Image (cartoon, rainbow, N blue to C red):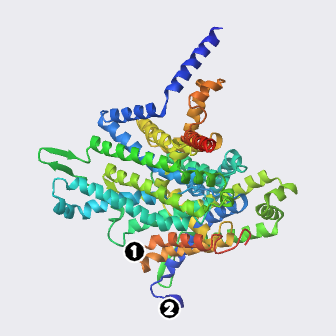
């Protein structure tokens, strides 16, 4: 393999692991970014949604149907319903406030605590793990390094989600409503868009994506209640670097952070976990709108 | 008839109480309460010290949030800055100081010096971090402070300079002052409580002075409307920067006290979840009131303690605070202090404008009104004096 001969330190497996870490980050970050881009809400509870998706999937697989894909869909949809309920019951009340941004952040932070503790109450503090679905649960050896084939599936699904979202936002009627409302909410409302319903719909979609991220990465990691808190900070880094509201930005940002998590420790022994935060600070100062444009790009 | 009679009596009683609540008497009552706490059982002394430290942490945080409208999710950085400052001085300079001032008094000197170093470290951090952060507003300010806090967290964990002892943190040994027949264990619960109480009261008074100074008034103007404040010729970002530094310094003092109380400076102090404690306490207490964060910290620690008495619920206290936080933001933004004031007005000041007025009435939010009134009085007095002089000449 030319890549391995050029950079002998990097194994193919590390690249694949980095991309699969990036893929799960993308699924959380893109929902976070979509919700911010359209509703202007920075959803602190998005990491909690991700964790909830993983738990529901695990619960369905072990108790209801022994089919990972069905369980993943159930997990994602369940999280979507939870998200829509939160938007409908709580966040909706804050849109018209003067300092709504910070109130929304604080309320969604309240839901971080509620979701975290509810999950702990239902499933306990221990960590769970499951095997990848049997079809993909085999090792691939490439260029002398080995990784699980399921990682390739996750990467493929993330790319699929990016393409589907892009088509949805740019090519469908609902997508045009989303774009219109995101650029001028009042004008959209005047033109007859049912803005509250659209907001709930977008929040549902963003939550489904977070839940899907959690469901798909359940076989790749051990699932514990602390998962949400860890992953939301990474998602914040991703959306800041990619640009709040940008979907392609979320993809590139997620892959960057994923690769950094996978490869970073091999190159920089000290301070490697500090680099993403340093990058976040620098992007916020120099280009607060992120490295990529707004919604739909 | 009897009902109205009772109402009248309650109202009269209320007004009598309200008139008795002068600032001096309340202060005296507070001082007596603080002294009495020192004689409580050891755990209660510890819990109350913990409350004082968290109260100061939240108060410092709210200087920025409540008074300039900037929500920081990274004040843990300054909390940890104070804690690590004193911890590292105690660890590395203790023997040196003992050589200079003698072993007997050295623990106290080291403690004080450590506190000063911790505070200096925090200010040195806050000057650049604040300068960079105040360029951003709202969500972006919350995000950049979060990033700075987590940057500090990563550096403390990975410890590239070999100072912070990684995930274990730095142990804090306060030692015993020994002057011949007289010895004093600084880390003893009651002694440490006394040190904390004096420090926190002094710091709260200092913050109160800042808030009610012309500087504080400008801050409030910025909170209400940055644009209008700017139109009045106020340098908004400079004021925010200065407030950021003062806010961080107050939090740094709380961090110094935290290190001694916990006997360790741990990396968790910089984590965003620690910064969030200040947010929770402030919002629950009422961010628009000076005493809001203090009341919020009281609620936070004592309800947590009360929940911990029930083993079945102990693990889930965060659930309660999450729900409370949501409820407060959604339905009652004034928080606990706003609720208490409302309750007081309902009970005592209802429909009786005279009584409410004479009792210092209205929302005694931060004494700002009282001070403003005095200032007005002084000014009008000056005007009169000038008018008099004018008449004479």
Q: Residue furthest left?
A: B180
Q: Is residue B258 left or right of residue A39?
A: left
Locate residue A242, reporting x and y percent. Answer: 63, 71
Residue A240 seen in the current view: yes
Tag 2 residue: A6
- The residue under the point 57% across, 69% down is A136
User: Which mark is on residue A270?
Assistant: 1
Q: Nearer the viewer, residue B39 or B46?
A: B39
**Mark 2 → mark 1, Cα distance in angstroms:** 25 Å
Position of residue A269 relative to residue B344, above or below, is: below
Q: Which class describes the residues within 10 Å of circle 1: few (<14), some (14-19), or many (20+)?
A: some
Locate residue B169, reporting x and y percent. Answer: 33, 60
- 2 or 1: tag closer to the N-terminus: 2
Q: Residue furthest front?
A: B393
> Quadrant of residue B239 in the image?
bottom right
Q: Nearer the viewer, residue A152 or B82?
A: B82
Q: Dots 2 and 1: beta carbons under 8 Å?
A: no
Locate residue B113, reporting x and y percent. Answer: 29, 58
- The residue under the point 65% across, 49% down is A82
Which secondary structure lies at badge 1? loop
Q: Is residue A239 left or right of residue B184?
A: right
> Quadrant of residue A173 in the image?
bottom right
């Amino acid at each position: 393999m030319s890549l391995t001969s050029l950079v002998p330190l990097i194994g193919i497996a590390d690249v694949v692991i980095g991309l699969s870490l990036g893929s799960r980050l993308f699924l959380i970050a893109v929902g976070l970014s979509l919700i911010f881009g359209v509703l202007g809400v920075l959803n602190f509870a998005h990491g909690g949604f991700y964790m909830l998706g993983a738990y529901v999937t695990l619960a369905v697989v072990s108790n209801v149907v022994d089919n990972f894909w069905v369980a993943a869909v159930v997990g994602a949809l369940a999280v979507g319903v939870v998200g829509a309920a939160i938007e409908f019951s709580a966040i909706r009340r804050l849109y018209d406030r003067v300092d709504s941004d910070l109130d929304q952040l604080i309320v969604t932070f309240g839901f971080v605590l509620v979701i975290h503790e509810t999950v702990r109450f239902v499933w306990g503090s221990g960590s769970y793990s499951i095997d990848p679905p049997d079809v993909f649960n085999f090792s691939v050896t490439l260029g002398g390094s080995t990784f699980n084939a399921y990682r390739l599936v996750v990467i493929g699904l993330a790319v699929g989600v990016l393409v589907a979202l892009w088509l949805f936002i740019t090519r469908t009627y609902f997508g045009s409503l989303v774009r219109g409302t995101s650029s001028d909410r009042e004008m959209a409302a005047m033109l007859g868009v049912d803005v509250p319903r659209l907001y709930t719909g977008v929040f549902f979609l963003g939550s489904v994506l977070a839940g899907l991220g959690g469901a798909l990465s359940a076989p790749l990691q051990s699932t514990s209640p602390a998962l949400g808190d860890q992953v939301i900070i990474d998602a914040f880094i991703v959306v800041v670097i990619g640009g709040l509201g940008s979907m392609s930005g979320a993809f590139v940002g997620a892959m960057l952070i994923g690769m950094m998590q996978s490869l970073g420790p091999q190159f920089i022994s000290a301070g490697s976990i500090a680099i993403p935060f340093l990058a976040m600070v620098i992007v916020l100062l120099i280009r607060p709108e992120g490295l990529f444009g707004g919604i739909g790009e | 008839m009897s009902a109205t009679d009772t109402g009248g009596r309650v109202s009269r009683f209320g007004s009598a109480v309200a008139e008795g609540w002068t600032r001096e008497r309340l202060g005296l009552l507070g001082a007596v309460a603080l002294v009495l706490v020192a004689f409580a059982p050891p755990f209660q002394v510890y819990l109350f010290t913990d409350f004082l430290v968290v109260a100061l942490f939240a108060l410092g945080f709210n200087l920025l949030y409540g008074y300039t409208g900037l929500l920081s999710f990274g004040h843990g950085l300054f909390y940890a800055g104070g804690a690590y400052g004193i911890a590292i001085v105690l660890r590395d300079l203790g023997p040196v100081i003992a050589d200079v001032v003698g072993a007997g008094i050295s623990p106290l000197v080291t403690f004080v010096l450590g506190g000063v170093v911790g505070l200096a470290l925090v200010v040195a951090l806050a000057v650049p971090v604040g300068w960079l952060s105040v360029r951003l507003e709202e969500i972006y300010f919350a995000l950049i402070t979060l990033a700075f806090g987590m940057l500090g967290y990563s550096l403390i964990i990975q410890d590239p300079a070999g100072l912070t002892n990684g995930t274990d943190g730095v142990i804090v040994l306060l030692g015993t002052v020994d002057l011949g027949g007289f010895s004093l264990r600084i880390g003893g619960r009651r002694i440490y409580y006394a040190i904390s109480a004096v420090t926190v009261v002094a710091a709260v008074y200092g913050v109160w002075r800042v808030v009610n100074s012309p500087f504080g008034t400008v801050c409030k103007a910025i909170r209400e409307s940055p644009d209008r404040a700017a139109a009045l010729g106020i340098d908004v970002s400079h004021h925010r920067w200065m407030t950021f530094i003062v806010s961080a310094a107050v939090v740094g003092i709380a961090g110094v006290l935290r290190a001694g109380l916990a006997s360790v400076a741990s990396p968790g102090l910089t984590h965003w979840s620690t910064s969030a404690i200040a947010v929770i306490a402030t919002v629950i207490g009422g961010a628009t009131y000076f005493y809001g964060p203090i009341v919020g910290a009281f609620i936070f620690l004592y309800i947590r303690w009360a929940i911990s008495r029930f083993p079945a619920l102990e693990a889930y206290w965060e659930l309660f605070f999450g729900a409370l936080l949501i409820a407060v933001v959604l339905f009652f933004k004034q928080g606990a202090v706003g609720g208490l004031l409302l309750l007081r007005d309902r009970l005592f000041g209802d429909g009786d404008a005279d009584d409410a007025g004479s009792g210092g009435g209205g929302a005694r939010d931060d004494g700002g009104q009282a001070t403003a009134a005095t200032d007005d009085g002084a000014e009008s007095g000056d005007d009169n004096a000038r008018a008099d002089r004018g008449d004479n000449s």
